[in-house]
């Protein structure tokens, strides 16, 4: 007997529904299982050497001030603007940053300019990130580099050509859990040659905190190990300035007498390193 199209082959609608439900349940379980595996893999993935370098580069980049520290201890610390931005990339992937510092009342007149080169530490050293400091061949040409539009800056290939003598290198290591910092470190033992104000060598320390704060401490010593320049009380503390407070930094009400500030500037570490 020929059956009509409406009769089908005798399948049970309830059975079909149960079969679809089981299939959907298996698919959902599979997705959950795959998601869990991916999450565990992501959480357990070790940070690579270049990941460390990227984190340090991002932390150093931006505009920061030592305003809070200068307010707490105006006899020993200035309110300084620290500004850093990407400038070039080397063939091996190392990032070149332009760095400058200026007194907060005259940001257009930086007194300290450097190139920083950030890259993973050599495998033979027990550290994660290497931050090298280099002089600039023609520093005047780079003033306010970060504040300019990109078409008004020297090109990356020009930047690389303007990297001058090596000044210092700091080896950073990831901080242990529970500490405020992300990375901290200093120059190799013995420091680096420096002749300012009777010094024979200088030391540099750097700490990168979890709140995007940067601590730096540079000091010069003579042959006898006596400190001849640099602050003695502790590192400079640079914190990102909220946009709303930047205008307050330059308010005439906050400006100290120029003459008194100039007297305090003499001998400051920021003018020597």
Image (spheres, rainbow, N blue to C red):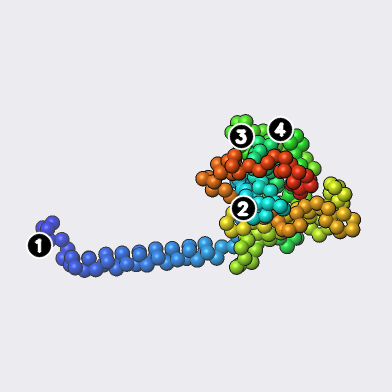
Quarter of the figure with residue 216 = bottom right
Quickly name the residue at label 4.
141
Outermost residue to the top: 152
Disc 4/disc 3 C-alpha distance (Å): 12 Å
Residue nearer the viewer, 233 or 186: 233
Going from the N terminus, do you reach mark 3 or mark 2 first? 2
- Circles 1, 4 touching at the beta carbon (< 8 Å): no
Q: Residue at x 85, y 47 (%)?
A: 197
Residue 8 at x, y percent in the picture: 15, 61
Residue 225 numbered mark, or none: none
Residue for point 55% across, 41% down: 247
- Name the residue beneath numbered marker 3: 148
**Position in image of residue 124 (x %, y %):** 75, 60
Q: How far apart are labels 3 and 2 at the CA level?
A: 27 Å
Crowd band around label 4 with a 10 angstrom C-alpha radius: few (<14), some (14–19), many (20+): few
Of circles 1 and 2, which is in front? 2
Please report the residue visible at 66 percent of the width from the left and 46 percent of the height from the top. Answer: 80
Which badge, 4 or 3, is on the more N-terminal residue?
Answer: 4
- Going from the N terminus, do you reach mark 1 or mark 3 first? 1
Q: Mark 1 highlights which residue?
A: 1
Residue 68: mark in rendering: 2
């Amino acid at each position: 007997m020929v059956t009509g199209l409406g009769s089908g082959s005798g399948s049970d609608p309830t059975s079909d529904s149960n079969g679809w439900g089981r299939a959907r349940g298996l698919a959902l379980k599979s997705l959950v299982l795959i998601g869990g595996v991916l999450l565990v893999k992501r959480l357990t993935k070790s940070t690579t050497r270049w990941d460390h370098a990227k984190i340090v580069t991002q932390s150093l980049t931006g505009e920061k001030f030592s305003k809070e520290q200068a307010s707490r201890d105006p006899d020993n610390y200035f309110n300084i603007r620290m500004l850093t931005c990407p400038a070039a990339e080397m063939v091996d992937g190392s990032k070149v940053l332009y760095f400058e510092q200026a007194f907060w009342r005259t940001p257009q007149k930086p007194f300290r300019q450097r190139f920083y080169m950030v890259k993973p530490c050599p495998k033979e050293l027990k550290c994660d990130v290497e931050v090298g400091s280099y002089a600039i061949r023609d520093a005047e040409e780079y003033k306010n580099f970060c504040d300019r539009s990109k078409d008004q800056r020297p090109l990356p290939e020009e930047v690389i050509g303007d990297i001058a003598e090596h000044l210092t290198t700091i080896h950073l290591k990831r901080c242990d859990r529970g500490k405020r910092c992300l990375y901290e470190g200093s120059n190799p033992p013995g420091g680096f040659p420096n002749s300012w104000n009777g010094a024979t060598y200088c030391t540099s320390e750097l700490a990168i905190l979890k709140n995007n704060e940067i601590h730096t401490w540079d000091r010069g010593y003579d042959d006898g190990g006596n400190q001849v320049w640099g602050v003695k009380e502790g590192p400079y503390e640079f914190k990102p300035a909220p946009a709303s407070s930047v205008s307050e930094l330059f308010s005439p009400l906050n400006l100290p007498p120029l003459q008194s500030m100039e007297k305090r500037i003499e001998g400051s570490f920021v003018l020597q390193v």
